[in-house]
Amino acid sequence: MIEVLVISEPGTTVHAEKDHLVLERGGHAVREVPLSGLSEVLCVGRVEWTSTALWKCLRHDVRVVFMTRDGRYLGRVSGALTRNGDLRLAQYRAVTEPKRAVEIAKRVVEAKMHNQRSLLMRRQRDLKDPDIALALSKIRRIMEQMGSAKDIEDVRGLEGAGAQIYFGVFGRLISNPLFSFCGRNRRPPRDPVNAMLSFGYTVVGALLEGDVEASGLDPALGCLHACAYGRASLMLDILEEFRTPVVDMVVLRLLNRRQIMPTDFGPPEGQSEDEEGEGDDNDDGFDPEKVIPALAESTEAMEDFRDGERDLKGAVYLRGPGKKIFLSALLPRLHERGFDANEKASFEIRALMRHQVYRMARAFVDKDCQYNGFKMKE
């Protein structure tokens, strides 16, 4: 079943006929997609929608996500929130009770660092790099210290230390001599690897935020990430568990298989949001005729979401063809199966993301229910 439709071709208009979305470009229909097979539509860049098409999406419970061409999340159109007020009251109580919030945050960070170590261990079997070996040892020691963390600041400090160590050796996993990685940077990304990481985190986070809303939880209130205006803190909490097994792994695949090139990146394309999509027909984006089967660092995460004014000097982004290549790898990755240690079974990663949302909900409702983060197979 098709779940996610990606549209990033400039000049695309979406309207509805019966129970289908119709994509047009240049006055000609290029694709018809049945609404019955969709859960989400991801629009990258300027995509025109008729009111009828949006109304049909709402009626069929299809979420529409909007992102700028350089990968910033703008927002979504989705149906009415669940009326489960008791669940939200339970969430508010849990996140404002320091002991419970810290325990949940610990589980999130433990899962995140487990996944970072798992990826490093997989690559280390072939690389046998002494710096990676040292990083693995350091991250393990940080994980051992997590049990003695007394408050949320301790947890965040340990998480930040682990992320610094992990990204300190991430470049060692890249075998393609055309690319290098000297550490994480953002707001904006200043090299191709960081451009892919930021764009990938934004896409996966946007999908995950829809899952949080659909569950009836409040996306703004999490345990690890502090509450701040416009921040989807709970989504960011759960996203931590999927950064490495989804985005980081896809970035490494593309680089090491030489499926993406330095020419697929560049500075901002120079158009304002109002002008976007009305310019050069040669600015290739994701093919609107191609429907991709669905999918499925820490407290620095908000660089990828609603981040307002930024200094774009030196910024590097995926360009049109690069976005097509990247999304063609990222979205199918979410359709792959991953082993869930909690259930001792394999599921599509996109389903695992939803599972974690509902595990979080159970932990909020039941004080005796321990939250367990998603841990990838070593």
Image (cartoon, grey):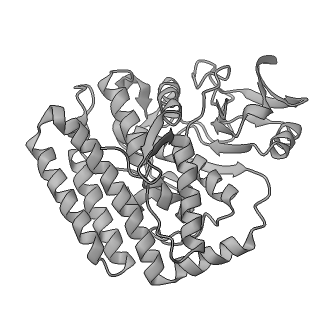
Name the spot of residue 33 as percent of width and height, x first.
76, 26
Q: Residue at x 18, y 51 (%)?
A: 136
Corner quadrant of residue 45: top right
Residue 308 visible (yes or no) = no
Q: Is residue 247 left or right of residue 166?
A: right
Q: Is residue 327 above or below residue 85?
A: above
Residue 231 horizontal side relative to residue 247, left or right: right
Tell me residue 73's x, y (percent).
58, 48
Name which quarter of the figure residue 357 lies in.
bottom right
How many marks are shown on the rendered structure?
0
Left or right: residue 41 compared with residue 316: right
Q: Nearer the viewer, residue 238 or 46?
A: 238
Measured along the vertical axis of the image, is residue 35 above or below residue 82? above
* Residue 103 coordinates in the image, percent (x, y): 41, 74
The residue positioned farthest toward the front in the image shown: 344
Q: Residue at x 67, y 30 (%)?
A: 2
